[in-house]
Amino acid sequence: MLDVQAIRKDFDILGREMRGKPLVYLDNAATTQKPRVVIEALVEYYRNYNANIHRGIYYLSELATEKYEQVREKTARFIGAPDPATIIFTRNTTEAINLVAYAWGRQYIEPGDEIVLTEMEHHSNLVPWQLLAQEKGARLRHIGITEDGRLALDDLDEIITERTKLLSITRMSNVLGTINPVKPLIDRAHAKGAICLIDGAQGVPHLPTEVLELDCDFLAFSAHKMLGPTGVGVLYGKREWLERMPPFLGGGDMISRVWLDRATWNKLPWKYEAGTPNIADVIAFGAALDYLEQIGMEAVRAHERELTAYALEQLSRVPGIRIFGPRHVEDRGGVISFDLEGVHPHDIGQLLDAEGVAIRAGHHCCQPLMERLDVSATARASFYIYNTEEEVDRLVEAVRKVERVFSRAVN
């Protein structure tokens, strides 16, 4: 079990007030708060060894390069990748997925090929494949969802077929909280000759992740959803694919040799990291990885499972509430989307803000899923390692207050 009170002391922002009340931060699916060690690592780079990397033959550059590349090794260990060269730093999950759509997709997708997605995907795992399919004459197929927010797998044999070239799927829904059975789906897709990408933006920060066990071909995730800074994403790819794919961006550092009319490419991983990277934030991400490794991802999952179970139980008692996604806590992560009868989610969000409770309200970059759920938007509370049952109580009481205010307005 986590010592949550000790953890909270590492996050200065959690001690501030919002609207004159103690802050309850429950928008972790959008971005997490940053512990002091992450902020200090960022400042230390700029204060003590700010220099460009890979190119300088002086001490500051060599030190910055060493610190930067150490984070690549830490990232590989964190997800169980045996080779740090298969870790590519990007700006975010979105860019990592676009890298695959561009560099792999434009090389290997042909007219008539099929790309399999799901109805619960974030726009970042829909739009790049829509663009690719339109360009290449490919077809998109979608695995549907059940009424309780799980993947509908009954007709999977008709969706994943010999025509399937790619399965791209979220490990955990940012709306429903659903933890998808990605391993058997990957195995099935591989049996048909397809490759598999996992959108790990929600999964990696909350669940133990071993890419060799999952056998995914690609995994994309972001630092800022796991205590790190914004502006850093990660793409893991199997070496066989990264070696065969062309570069994503052209420019400095991704080249081996350049002539006026042609160029050859750098070796992995720098083949995909053109130009000066986000050095400071990658180094600070290393501090976030150290922090999470010290806690242990099994402990992170156990804490969220307990907190989510408590929140589901308490929220379900609010009159007029509808909670989306699986009700069994083993099948979902620390994300709870809901609505209140007769109340727009934006009104819920604003009224909760007045109570010092920060949640997200909107379509969460999942408009097709909203259409499937027959709503325009939802309110969403999402938890992380520093959240407590007392904060859940604050959330529930604030939601009850919203329900009472609108009930009186109607009556």
Image: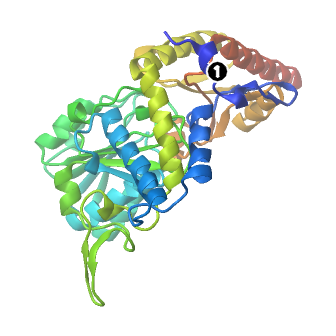
On the image, the x and y values in percent for residue 75 come to 37, 40
- Frontmost residue, 9 versus 172: 9
On the image, the x and y values in percent for residue 324 come to 53, 26
* Amino acid at the residue labelled 1: Arg
Is any atom of residue 110 visible in this view?
no
In the picture, measured across the screen, residue 410 lies left or right of residue 32, that is right
At label 1, counting other C-alpha atoms closer than 10 Å, the crowd grade (few under 14, some 14-19, many 20 or more) is: some
Instruction: Identify the coloring.
Output: rainbow
User: Which image quadrant for residue 128?
Assistant: bottom left
* Secondary structure state at the residue bearing disc 1: helix
Residue under numbered circle 1: 8
- Position of residue 197 relative to residue 302, above or below, is below
- Position of residue 220 relative to residue 137, above or below, is above
Residue at the limit of the structure toward the front, as seen here: 59
- Position of residue 371 relative to residue 314, above or below, is below
In the picture, measured across the screen, residue 206 lies left or right of residue 115, that is right
Report the residue at 24% width, 50% height from top. 166
Number of numbered discs overlaid on the protein picture: 1
In the picture, measured across the screen, residue 231 lies left or right of residue 411, that is left
Please state, as top left, top right, bottom left or bottom right, where the C terminus lies in the image.
top right
- Frontmost residue, 312 versus 295: 295
User: Which image quadrant for residue 42?
Assistant: top right
In the picture, measured across the screen, residue 249 lies left or right of residue 25, that is left
